[in-house]
Image: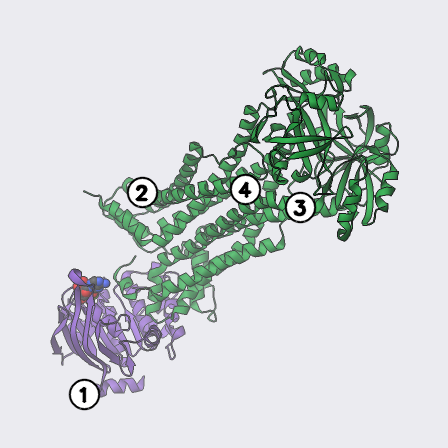
Amino acid sequence: MVNVLDIKVVRDLWSMRLQVLSIAMLVAAGVAVFVMSVSNYRALVGAMESHYRNERFADLFAGTTRAPLVIADRLREIDGIGIVEPRVAKPVRIIREDTNLPISGRIISLPAEGQPLLNRLHLVQGRWPDPLHPEEVIINAAYAEARAVRMGQPVEVVLNGRLQDFRVVGSALSPEFVFATRSAVPLPDDRNFVVLWAGEDAVASAFDMKGAFNDVAMTIAPGSSVRHVLDEVDRLLAPYGGTGAYNRGDQPSHRFLEDELAEQETLSIFMPSVFFGIAAFLLNVVIGRMVEAQRGQIASLKALGFANGTIALHYFKLVTAIALLGSAVGLVLGCWFAVGVVGSYRAFFRFPSLDARFEPWLLVAATLVSVVAANLAAATSVYRIAVLPPAEAMRPATPPALQTFAWLQTMGSRVIPLQYIIAARTTLGRPIRTVLSTIGIALAIPLILFGLYWFDAIDYMIDVSFSRIERGDAFLTFTEPVSTDTLHELKALPGVLNAELQRVVPVRLRVGYRTYRTSAIGLDPGSELRVPRDKALQPISIPADGIMLSRQIASQLDLHVGDTVSIDVLEGARAVREVIVRRISDDILGSSVTMDRSALNHVMREGPVANVAALRIDSAQSELVWSRIKSMPRIEGSSVKALWLSLFNDTIGEMVLIGALILAGFGMLIAIGVVYNSARIALQERAWELAGLRIIGLTRREVSAVIVSELVAELVVAIPLGLLIGRYLIELIASARASQSFQIPVVIDPSSYVIALLLVIAAAFASFIMIRRRIDTLDLVAVLKTRD
Amino acid sequence: MQTSEQEAEDSAAQPPVPVFVARGLSKVYGSGDSQVTALKNVDLDIRQGEFIVLLGPSGSGKSTLLNILGGLDAPTSGSAKWRDHQLTGAGDTELTTYRREHVGFVFQFYNLIPSLSVEENVRLVAQIASDPMDPKEALELVGLSHRARHFPSQLSGGEQQRVAVARAIVKRPDILLCDEPTGALDVDTGRLVLAAIAKVNAELGTTTIVITHNSAIAGMADRVLRLSGGRIVKEEPNPDRVSAEDVQW
Ligand SMILES: Nc1ncnc2c1ncn2[C@@H]1O[C@H](COP(=O)(O)OP(=O)(O)OP(=O)(O)O)[C@@H](O)[C@H]1O
Ligand SMILES: [Mg+2]
């Protein structure tokens, strides 16, 4: 026979269906965000790991000017080294009829036959080059996609100053170029950066590198000392113009990827966990009150002789059913959204396969957390009621603080209508419950803010990076250092409003055994197209001599103002110099090494030269400008801010947008759920009292005023509290991560606060309408028949 | 107060116009097999200031009738009106106004607001009435003015019921409707409550209807209506009304 209490479970669920639904929705939102985010992050990490494993991403990298191939054998003898893959890798330019923008890139040699041992290619389209056809090349898939390159299409490449015709036979992904970047230019741009892989004969002969290599990828044997191997590699390559061996941490694509993943980790794990935590807390509050509202029923069950355990089990079933319903919906939604969001990642993260992953542990954990959170709340409430003698529990609870605090009794003059006194006493007379449900409403606000914050943060970072710091409209890089003559030449171009030279040099900073690989930027005094700024966005002046470091780098290297740091230049003559740290800046981008350009020239032991130009261009004449620049010699590549920004909006922008929308949407659902539940439970607990008021002749409005004013009082406290908590949590999240390059700033636009506030008010308003409707339809006669 | 007292005396002398007029009242709950008829074709006239007692077995439709007369429930068919207030087919707003201005209720469960003191519970009604008495005066009538500052949870059941009576009469209602007001009370307390009700009926000329299971209380009535199976099966005028103190049960 079916247990009667089980029938009650089903009946209760049905009679509270809207409330059950809203609680389940709360669980679902928490679970969905959690599942979606964690599985997205896991998808990225998994995609990276499998790409690296399948395509055998190297552990160590080194460059030289020109080393004979026998040196590769010497490298193989180093203790602790694994595979050694020498190759030729050189900068190239591509000429296209349809654009004036210079397109730069790299050409990398492939072994005569088959895949390289390390950094293999994952063919996306086409086929492998035929060794008998040296003109066949594989092109990086990102560029092929951005420029719509078809297989079989010819490509004109400037190699070593000579124009040579190749033919694209395949497009591929490489673990070395998950993000294709040039170190000198701050903006990665798929349209204007290309990677070509061609047979080693073709590349070697074009660069006069037969029997030699200038680049080497290596793996390290498990358990060996990276430091030691790097030192040995450096020692062996030094006579051949070695530019310093480095590991993955300094490999540009990997470093960028790591930063991105760190960012994603915040977005995907930390924030959803806070989100989920808040949802669990809210669930706790809501379930607790729901059980409390059944106080009389629990007392009657006890009076009838049911044991506490049986009663607890009854509520366990009720609450578990709700939590499971919510979790099920949340899991489905979470997985569904994860698939969508991972799809939007694909434009940005170039992996052979990037698919949402739903690890069983994650699904189980999410469900367990919600079931436990719900039951914890139910258990405490049931326990509280169960310890009361049934007689007492059967009586409607008088606000406990009413007897304790005399002022609560005497409050209210004859001017204040008594319905407000009822509201005030109920609110203040149960301080713990009031505080909990106020916090509950307040916590809904950060959930909405989380989503909106990402828009604000990204907007702010773009604004800071590209209109406050990098103020040029475009950047040019040169194949070899240029002098001020080039600057005059550029300035003289019609349509160029301003031009400035920068010296950007890959360097390794060294203090004792600590090193940091980065690019040093040399700027002219009073430079306007690149303005370093501190966290308050105030310009930072560049010391005339010595070096200026971001605080982050300084602390990694344990450097203080006045200390000496040695700079190993990783290009050209590979100068090594000691310089004095003149300033440690709190610069907003987080990690930069800046010097006066002439000071950097001095380190480089060169004249007043530069290799990057920043330009301000009159947008009306930009075509003209670029057509002139195209014909200038020594231009390696370019990037255009506007193009990059639109690319950014299509990739990261879209990614963040989707994530943020989902977060904000769920935040809203939770906000509505919490406010609705507060109101709904207040109604349930007080139906009897409210009906009494209606019977003695109070109008619907007067009766609604009781509950509405209680809710309004909670809202008035909860909203500012929620905004404050939101800001605090976002600060916490921002500080919890220390990305290598970008610090996420804590910027919340006032409009975000306003939106969060309006949404909660809208949720409250919807609840008021619901309260009003309930009060309108209160069955006065039914209420008279029972006490509960 | 003077005039209503006069009216009460008048009513004893010559039959005045009825204030409540109900015709063909029926109330059916549910439909099909589970259909329950709570009231069947009830006709009823009640005069100004009359003290009516409704008797009848459980489930006979007493509460249903009282609730319809109090503007809390609507019949399935038939009509009811109080003076010029149509009680059937009226909207919630009119019924609320009717209850607010004219009706006082006392129920078996006292229905006091737990967060308001005794005096405030009474004042709550005074606050919305057009010509209320002083809440203290109403408490005086039920003999509870010394407990004015206490909260309902600090009172006994009988005391709470007297507060409910005070709350019902503070607005000088034209009609006082009581559904088993002594149901949960012992003899002595019940008597106090009944005395308060009778006093209001006598002094304010309030038309009073009391539901009870205790036929002894019927002795206090001007007229006793007996319900059974949703019909008024017996109507007994009671020429020798006894006072609440003399009611035996
Ligand atoms: N909401 C309802 N649904 C179905 N039947 C109902 C409903 N309310 C009352 N009834 C039925 O109507 C009939 C009359 O009910 P009513 O409450 O008027 O009885 P009563 O005379 O007041 O009884 P008691 O003395 O027990 O209070 C009963 O048979 C009852 O079961
Ligand atoms: Mg009844």
Q: Chain of mark 4?
A: A
Badge 2 amino acid:
Lys
- The green one among the chains is A
Q: Position of residue A549 (x, y in %)?
A: 76, 34
Q: Residues within 10 Å of mark 2 (few under 14, many from 20)?
A: some
Residue holding disc 4: A344
Query: Which image quarter is the C terminus of chain A in?
Result: bottom left
Q: CA distance from mark 1 to mark 4?
A: 88 Å
Q: Furthest residue to the front?
A: A132
Q: CA distance from mark 1 to mark 2?
A: 64 Å
Q: Position of residue B117 (x, y in %)?
A: 39, 64
Secondary structure type for disc 1: loop
Q: Quadrant of ligand 1?
A: bottom left
Task: Determine which quarter of the picture holds residue B102.
Answer: bottom left
Establish whether labels 1 and 4 are both on one chain.
Answer: no
Q: Mark 1 or 4, which is nearer the eye? A: 4
Q: Residues within 10 Å of mark 4 (few under 14, many from 20)?
A: many
Secondary structure type for disc 4: helix
Q: Mark 3 or 2, which is nearer the eye? A: 3
Establish whether labels 1 and 2 are both on one chain.
Answer: no
Q: CA distance from mark 1 to mark 3?
A: 94 Å
Q: CA distance from mark 3 to mark 4?
A: 17 Å
In contact (CB < 8 Å): disc 3 and disc 2: no
Residue holding disc 2: A317
| Of callouts 3 and 4, the N-terminal one | 4
Residue holding disc 1: B15
Q: Which mark is residue B40?
A: none
Badge 3 amino acid:
Leu
Q: Position of residue A781 (x, y in %)?
A: 27, 65
Residue holding disc 3: A645
| Of callouts 2 and 4, the N-terminal one | 2
Colour chain B appears in: purple
